[in-house]
Amino acid sequence: MNYDAMFQSALDGLHADGSYRYFAELERRAGDFPKAFHHGIGREVTVWCSNDYLGMGQHAEVLAAMHKALAETGAGAGGTRNISGTNHYHVALEKELASLHGKESALLFNSGYLSNWVTLGTIAARLKGCVVLSDASNHASMIEGIRHSRAEKQIFRHNDVEDLERRLKEIPADVPKIIAFESVYSMDGDIAPIEAFCDLADKYGAMTYLDEVHAVGMYGEHGAGIAEKLGLSHRLTVIEGTLGKGYGVVGGYIAASAPLCDFVRSFGSGFIFSTALPPMIAAGALASVRYLKRSQKERDGQQRAVAYMREALDRAGIPHVQNDSHIVPVMVGEADLCRALSDELLTRFGHYLQPINYPTVARGTERLRLTPTPLHTNEDIDEMVVALSTLWQERQLKRSVAA
Ligand code: PMP
């Protein structure tokens, strides 16, 4: 058997349908973000697709906390959480996250992906007869967790309150139910009708599971996300977040009741049997969470940059999706064109922006997804919009009506 030939033939399929993923070697240099060194083209570039949404990955307080913890505790955690791997930084971070979201308890995971996969997988598998109602646009980590649980899953239309209610009505009252959804959806930047979903959860006795991965650090008075901004944190059964995007480090978590967190901690094999995050990571994340709890500067700066970019795109007639978040999708609608635009932005103009193609988004909705941060200056934004405008002009692409 030629196994490599089998692997290669699957990869050829990805190349053929334009969905093969490229991995640019990008040198992030602390202090220079959003500039980075791109090894492929051998020059400095401006990064437009980083999920280090607020630039906290280079924040002085975060770096200092990590240096200090590294010197104190060494490199790794030394074990799984229950076998010698729990350090006081893990405990302090869990307390901080619980209090941030107004919950009794929190539980750390090695990534946001794992927090979704383990929590949904464990609850849905262990609560007998559980039915999961999952938004059609949910992230792969939720989808995989639900699949792993082997529980019954119903996919409701994206952000559709009526479709969700129609399904809830059909499920017997005594059956455990979870409504799983996100607050800010990462590809369109649209926001879920959280309050209406919570109302339905109350009416039909369901739990609510909210992924705030693209919102924590960035929304709400203390950076606790959209639920905090809308005053709804107390109505959600589980709030899940990442420490790798707005908070700039790595790791994931859930915040919920003490019994729920203890349940996942006690039954979730993906939590139990995996080496804990290094204490220095927990220390860095803790510093980032605490800092963003009190500082509005980064959130304000992000909103400023996003508003400035949207206005500049409107003036140039570059079509982009309107939403109430920091995610600015520029619609292209064709995979090859999307990749070509991204290549030209990089090689001619020094802007690094990965194309978003199928299967991340549906065919025909390929796009360039811009995430301006507080560290992008107006000049950076002007340069990017001029580059886009030049490409739109040269390729005679459709402009938006505002132009
Ligand atoms: N949920 C959503 C909605 C995401 O977009 C992502 C990551 N892109 C995750 C969860 C996983 O988070 P992490 O990157 O921390 O694993």
Image (cartoon, rainbow, N blue to C red):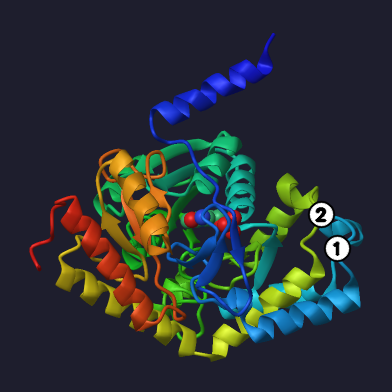
Q: Badge 1 local density, few (<14 within 10 Å), some, or many (20+)? A: many
* Place of residue 372 in the rendered image (x, y in percent of width and height, measured from the top left): 40, 72
Label 1 CB-ligand 1 distance < 8 A: no
* Place of residue 322 in the rendered image (x, y in percent of width and height, measured from the top left): 23, 65
Q: Is residue 85 above or below residue 133?
A: below
Q: Is residue 11 visible?
A: yes
From the viewer's side, name the closer residue of 259 and 23. 23
Residue lying at 27% horizontally and 41% vertically, measured from the top left: 334
Q: Is residue 268 visible?
A: no
From the viewer's side, name the closer residue of 171 and 345. 345
Q: Quadrant of the N terminus?
A: top right
Residue lying at 56% horizontally and 64% vertically, measured from the top left: 37
Disc 2, disc 1: CB below 8 Å? yes
Numbered badge on residue 275:
2
From the viewer's side, name the closer residue of 205 and 343. 343
Q: Is residue 153 above or below residue 225?
A: above
Element type where label 1 sits in the image: loop
* Place of residue 217 in the rendered image (x, y in percent of width and height, measured from the top left): 52, 76
* Place of residue 46 in the rendered image (x, y in percent of width and height, measured from the top left): 45, 68
List the single residue furthest toward the top.
Answer: 1
Give the amino acid type for the residue marked by disc 1 in the picture: Ala
> Taking 23 as reference, is 281 left or right?
right
Q: Earlier in the sequence, mark 2 or mark 1?
A: 1
> Taking 139 as reference, is 330 left or right?
left
Numbered badge on residue 77:
1
Element type where label 2 sits in the image: loop
